[in-house]
Amino acid sequence: MKIAQVVIDRPVRGLDRAWSYDIPEGLQLTPGTRVEVPLGTGKAVGIVVAISDTNPTQIELKSISATLDPYPVLTPEMIDLAHWMAERYVCFLPQALRAMIPSAVRRGIKAKVIWHYQTVGERSGRSSLKQTLWEWIREHPQTTDEEMQQAFPKHRPLLRALVAEGSVLATQDVKAKKLRTNPSPYHLNTDQLAAITAIGDLPGQEWLLEGVTGSGKTEVYLAVLQHVLQRGGQALILVPEIALTPQTWERFSGRFPDSTYVWHSNLTDGERVQLWQAVQTDEPLVVIAARSGVFLPFQKLQLIVIDEEQETSYKQEDHPRYHAREVAVRRAATFGATLIFGSATPSLETAWKARQGHIGWIKLPSRVMQRSLPEMRVVDMRQELEMGNRGMFSKVLIDAISLALEREQQVLLFLNRRGFSTFVLCRSCGQALGCPHCAVTLTYHSDHDHLRCHYCDFAMPMPTHCPMCHSDKIRYFGAGTERVVTEVQRLWPRARIVRADRDSLTSRDSYYQLYRTFVQGQADVLVGTQMIAKGMDFPRVTVVGIVAADLGLHFPDFRSGERTFQLLVQSGGRAGRGADPGQVVVQTYNPEHYAITHAVTQDVDAFVRQELEMRQELGYPPFGSLWLLELSGTDDQAVRQTAQQLGEQLVLRLAENAAEVLGPSAAPLLKIRNHYRYHILIRTSSEELPVNRILLDMQSDYPELSITADPYFML
Ligand code: ADP
Ligand code: ZN
Ligand code: ZN
């Protein structure tokens, strides 16, 4: 008797585990195959995650009804990965599987891929239908499902049985790709060559490639990749945001025209399934992907690159709250693949591993072609105010922009806030207009002339009178990107301006459009949020203005210093990437904050040293582990009580594990979408596994509880 462990593909609480089913006599089944099983009075689709010889339960089991794939959709490596994810990120196995497998694959959508069948060896059987089909296939080598369908309308179960017993081989028709490469147009410099040699000499090693902005890291990836492809291997290049993809994709596909794939959210279901299957062959290829690409079921993975590895977009916010960097580390280790973390401003976690010697550390300390790093100038906005400048641009920045525009160079202006104003206030009664569903103020958007909540998307027309006291003294305060555009227009009426933020860029095509427009010189000034601060390479930009450097500094989050530092250095890195030197103007009210002073001198080492010291003192990552527990509900009082009760229980249960329980306390954003939110933080310096198990166990008692291991969003 064989028993299959099946995870049901339905997001229903209570089904959140694997179920045992009997495997009918004669059915060949491997883990990773989709099956149909009886469930209640109906049927459901599930994935086999394990097969055993004994029935772990006392009750009689139902049988699997049918298999849905001629081959498994998941490799054993990925089933292991799902188990690990469930534990590491405190979620249930079905949740992990659901995150890993695209819904198109789970739903069994057909790829554009065509399967070809041929017979293997000899097969003798009674004159059964199965035998007849086998003989027909032998006479029609490389036949397809479609052809078979014509001759044998009900061939599928028979064919599946033939494939399972090994007498028929199924192969894919992913366009036979030859490895074609275009050589690098550059003479790589000594630092680049040294990096390539070091990485090539120790395959399977983890590396931090710490290269200042514009130091030519991508050329290093491309050279390492070329080796991998020539050896017949597969590679994954992770990029943080879709905004970076057009340019990255162009560089990779330009170099490897027949072997580059992209994995992004605009793929059709069929394309998704096709790529899912392509990486399961042993075709040499490279996939450029955002976060979820880390789950592609590669067969011959030899290289993973995580570009801009410090980016928080690698952390998934919804269940399972995985970090692509950690998943990549695990997968690279299983495959013995080389792993490269690329960054000018590494995360503290990676910087620490490199400094401890746990991973290799390679530096590219200078820009290519002896280009200098941009000159960084700090402007103390308090002094501007004292000097009577109430505008959003300092004198220094205005002069720099004027000069650049005169010389027909380009300007980037960063402000990490969308909309026109950040809040709208009545000057008579002093009330700020807030969202009725969230504990936040509404943002004015000039292009729609309305107020909008950035947390729940509630929108209302801009009122002419205060809703509270009916006064007409309503004024805008705080500036967002839309207001920066208006101001640039006012000061430089002839400048051609484009805006890049989440409101103006809604699709992958609009990113590409924007990138093209700017690169081809059809615009002079690009105003944007941090979304454009990284990666993009605009050679004609000579001035970068950071309108409010301290915006992120005062977030109640231990990573706020790190993020500010990274953002400033990255933004600065956009200047002077061409032949003309660049200049960066950093406007701030906190010029003496260490994140700002070290960013201005672009001293990563000094920043990392100071930040690590602080983290060690406070027991924050990388020196300890954190979990954020959030309870939420519509009844403030009830949620608070539950949180209190949970907190007390946690203290008892975690006592042995030297774990600290902080809180409960009201979340910094107490109310979102009419839900009141309370937080508990758990901190430990020891092994995380026992804590994960305890939390997973407790989760079942608290339906409103959401747990984040290693949280990145603490609001
Ligand atoms: P990074 O990713 O480190 O910021 P890139 O790889 O984007 O840097 O390189 C910056 C620019 O310099 C790109 O336009 C790239 O094509 C170019 N480049 C890279 N290596 C060289 C080289 N050895 N000589 C000349 N230009 C180079
Ligand atoms: Zn009022
Ligand atoms: Zn809201």
Image (spheres, rainbow, N blue to C red):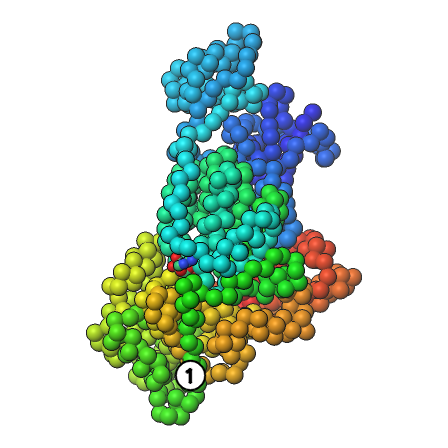
| Residue under the point 28% across and 70% down | 409
As drawn, 116 above or below 207: above
Residue shown at 58%/74% (left/top)? 606
- Name the kind of residue labelled 1 in the image: Val
575 or 441, nearer to the observer = 575
In the current view of this chain or complex, which residue is farthest to the top? 127
The answer to which image quadrant residue 630 occupies is: bottom right
Locate the N terminus and report the quarter of the image it occupies.
Answer: top right
Q: Which residue is mark 1?
A: 379
- Total marks shown come to 1
Instruction: Give the secondary structure at mark 1.
Output: strand
- 332 or 296, nearer to the observer: 332
Please tell me in which quadrant of the rendered image residue 373 appears: bottom left
* Frontmost residue, 633 versus 567: 567
Is any atom of residue 219 visible in this view?
yes
Q: Position of residue 213 (x, y in %)?
A: 45, 65
Circle 1 crowding by C-alpha within 10 Å: few under 14, some 14–19, many from 20: many
Q: Residue at x 53, y 80 (%)?
A: 593
Where is residue 256? Give x, y as percent.
40, 44
Asked whether residue 238 is in view, the answer is no
Q: Is residue 9 above or below residue 715?
A: above
Task: Indicate the position of residue 640 as horizontal and vertical percent values.
Answer: 61, 68
Residue farthest along the right direction in this orientation: 656
Q: Residue at x 50, y 55 (%)?
A: 193
Q: Is residue 364 above or below residue 257?
A: below
The answer to whether the beta carbon of the residue marked 1 is less than 8 Å from any atom of ligand 1 is no
Q: Is 494 situated left or right of 221 in this image? A: left
Residue 299 locus on image (x, y percent): 54, 38
> Which residue is outermost to the left?
494
